[in-house]
Image (tube, rainbow, N blue to C red):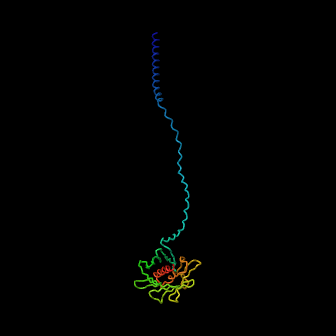
Amino acid sequence: MRKILLVLMVLTLALSLAGCGEKADTSKKEPAKESAASKPAAPPSAPPAAPTETAKPAAPAASTPSAPAEASKPAQPPAAPKPPDNVEARYQITTGVDKEITTISRLKDGRWTAKFGDKNYGLQMGDKITFYLPDGTGLSVQHKADKYKLMKGKDVYLEVRPSKDKLKVIKENKENRALNFKTKDDKVKVYIGEKDEVGYVKYYAENGKLKAKNKKGEELAVTKDIAKLSPALAPFLFNKSLNQDDRAFLAMLFLSMDK
């Protein structure tokens, strides 16, 4: 009996030891399971980004065709200057073969001015008459009994003797070489002395021009500002007998007598 009990006790002990071993193994394995389970799940990886489209270079802005430059207009000639308020009349005379413009003006205060190229002359009319040279020198003009005497100091330089249908100009007292301007019909005939014809001045009504021509028929002076027959252009027929100062004085004086 005792043997049977002893065997049973041994078996019981052996079984209990075996059960403890199994529990021990189970307890060892569970922590591993728990540690694995305790780890937080990794977040799902983001899906791969869609490939970005390569930026295309911006297309160049379409250039708007510029309006064609306006064709340059030809320069217009400057407008002719208006006469000053004190100018009563202005006479433009084309003179010589080079067609130089000579301008003679009558002012309201009795003065006359003449522009020959770059030289300016003046003639002050009135009780006392003075002829002004370009440098400002004033030459006295004596006026007695229808005679005009241009003085240089105490000497008579030019003497003008007007009469009906005739003008006589004596330079430096050389009466035999006097310049004579004779009006006949539609012309003013011009002479040195009494017979040496130099040319003539004629008014052409068809085109309104007053012209001075030499005996060859060449135009030496022309204007549209003197609308009648006048000896005012006659001095321009003389290139040797008269110098420029002489022509300026006589042209202004003839215009003043003929106004």
Q: Nearer the viewer, residue 238 or 86?
A: 86
Pinpoint residue 1: horizontal percent, then vertical percent.
46, 9
Work out which residue is located at the far right of the displayed protein and give it: 206
Work out which residue is located at the far left of the displayed protein and give it: 153
Work out which residue is located at the far top of the displayed protein and give it: 1
How many numbered marks, from 0 up? 0
Q: Nearer the viewer, residue 235 or 254?
A: 254
Q: Nearer the viewer, residue 14 or 39?
A: 39
Pinpoint residue 144: horizontal percent, then vertical percent.
45, 84
Pinpoint residue 130: horizontal percent, then vertical percent.
43, 79
Rendered view: 71 above or below 198: above
Pinpoint residue 124: horizontal percent, then vertical percent.
45, 77
Rendered view: 67 above or below 130: above
